[in-house]
Image (cartoon, rainbow, N blue to C red):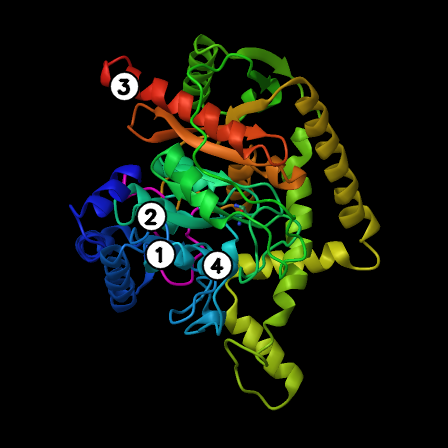
Amino acid sequence: MRALAEMLSAGDVTSVELVQHYLDQIQSTDQDIKAFLHVDREGALQAAQAADERRKAGTPLSPWDGIPIAVKDNICTVGMPTTCASRMLKDYYSPFDAEVVTRIKGAGLPILGKTNLDEFAMGSSTEYSAYQITHNPHDLTRVPGGSSGGSAAAVAAGLCPWGLGTDTGGSIRQPAAFCGVVGLKPTFGRVSRWGLVALASSMDQIGPMGRTVEDVEILFSLIAGYDQRDSTSCPDSGYEFGNESLGTLAGIRLGIPEEFFGEGLSPEVAARVREAVRRMEDLGAEVRPISLPHSAYSIDTYLTLVTAEASSNLARYDGVRYGLRVEADDAVSMFKQTRTKGFGPEVKRRIMLGTYVLTASHHAAYYEQARRVRTLITQDVESAFEEVDVVVTPTTPSTAFRIGEKQDPLQMYLSDSYTAIANLAGIPALTLPCGKDKLGLPIGIQLMADHFREDVLFWVGRMLERSLKEADSSGRI
Ligand code: GLN
């Protein structure tokens, strides 16, 4: 992104040209990828025009003024639909911008459009979108991952330079890994959720996706920081871009939890991740085996909590205040028919499961139990960070699977086996590409750090990325 910013500031390219370039790419390629649910040609070009005028007047809003972006369609935007890829919110227009949207507009970023997702961000492939399935740019017969599959595929296919996603259990990191891009799930409380359509409020985070660690770091610096309208927002949580990373990883302790390298992990993914660990060791990092003994329960815990919170958050779609309404003779039938028609099968499954785990008779056995296990998992993570700076794992158990391959929802849920732990514990986690499998599909490595230590993730991530790039160009991988 620095190169683009320099070209803009030198006058080698205008924002209008840049936006036009991405619109042309979308026009020619997105019929195959299907990353966008909505493209805002006019709005993006207008914003670009304004950016160019500011440049001319010598008053750019930021070094990134005029560089366009794509936004996941569960983040509210004025002037564009916000559908959450659900029939329930078909043609819904938010009357306000999400705080992150206000911030990116404040930095001068024109918004190209809204990207596809699994309905209400529930899923790992975008196959649960009510509108379209997004295809993985590396192999169109495969999924891009989910739920932020639209943003990941758009970045990977060069339809936008960077994008915003959301991550409740892995929805930024898993698609980033499947599409060979970089993605960050920030510390819980560091990026405002004001204007994010809620899935599970104790875990949802908005985060940046891009082609390089540096791009993700820049975008993170634009969206991080306190917002009084989000009651979970942390004071002094802003992030300043610009700390040059040191030349080595000396002094960095990497923890390798063996629980994440066992059953269910593709040998090719394991091999690439272990190779990346050796690379970081060569750069000076110290590698230590660690244990996160309760991590085996993270998926069960996550699913219990995510369904419970979703069932409560989605109660607002009743046909009264916004979204779809199916008219009926009385109010209760109207609620029923609206919800029957408006929600897809995965959303219904989760609402039912979530309602069940919250019922008076099962609350203690499921919901309360899951909260207790969440505490144990969080304690595991806290003690790990007493010993190490970064926990390293694969991002996903496998590379991108084929469209239609995972019919069993339980199989789909296992996609989040390695990512949900960061949401449960509220810690930041970065994924970056660390090679490909023999089919040429990207493999992601996940780096997790303690609360508010995104700086460490960016440092280690950048060093690893550079080392992988050097090896790549010398033909060693
Ligand atoms: N794939 C996970 C799920 O289906 C994650 C969703 C998310 O992070 N939004 O719940």
Q: Earlier in the sequence, mark 1 or mark 4?
A: 1
Q: Residue at x 49, y 34 (%)?
A: 430
| Quarter of the view holding residue 179 | top left
**In the structure shown, which secondary structural element does the residue marked by tag 2 occupy?**
loop
Q: Disc number at residue 472?
A: 3
Q: Which residue is mark 4?
A: 119
Please report contact status of discs 1 and 3: CB closer than 8 Å, yes or no.
no
Q: Earlier in the sequence, mark 3 or mark 2?
A: 2
Q: Up-down: is 261 above or below 144? A: above
The reply to whether the magenta stretch includes residue 270 is no
| Residue nearest the viewer, comparing 95 with 49 | 49
Q: Which residue is mark 1?
A: 108
Q: Residue at x 76, y 33 (%)?
A: 376
Observer-side mark, 1 or 4, equals 1
Please report contact status of discs 2 and 1: CB closer than 8 Å, yes or no.
yes
Q: Earlier in the sequence, mark 1 or mark 3?
A: 1
CB of mark 2 near ligand 1 (< 8 Å): no
What distance separates the C-alpha of mark 3 from that of mark 4? 37 Å
Look at the image and tell me whether residue 456 can be seen: yes
Look at the image and tell me whether residue 145 can be seen: no
x, y percent for residue 409: 53, 47
What distance separates the C-alpha of mark 1 from that of mark 3? 35 Å
Observer-side mark, 1 or 3, equals 1
Q: Which residues are magenta?
A: 124-143
Seen in the image, is 286 located left or right of residue 37?
Answer: right
Q: Disc number at residue 64?
A: 2
**In the structure shown, which secondary structural element does the residue marked by tag 3 occupy?**
helix
Seen in the image, is 382 located left or right of residue 82?
Answer: right
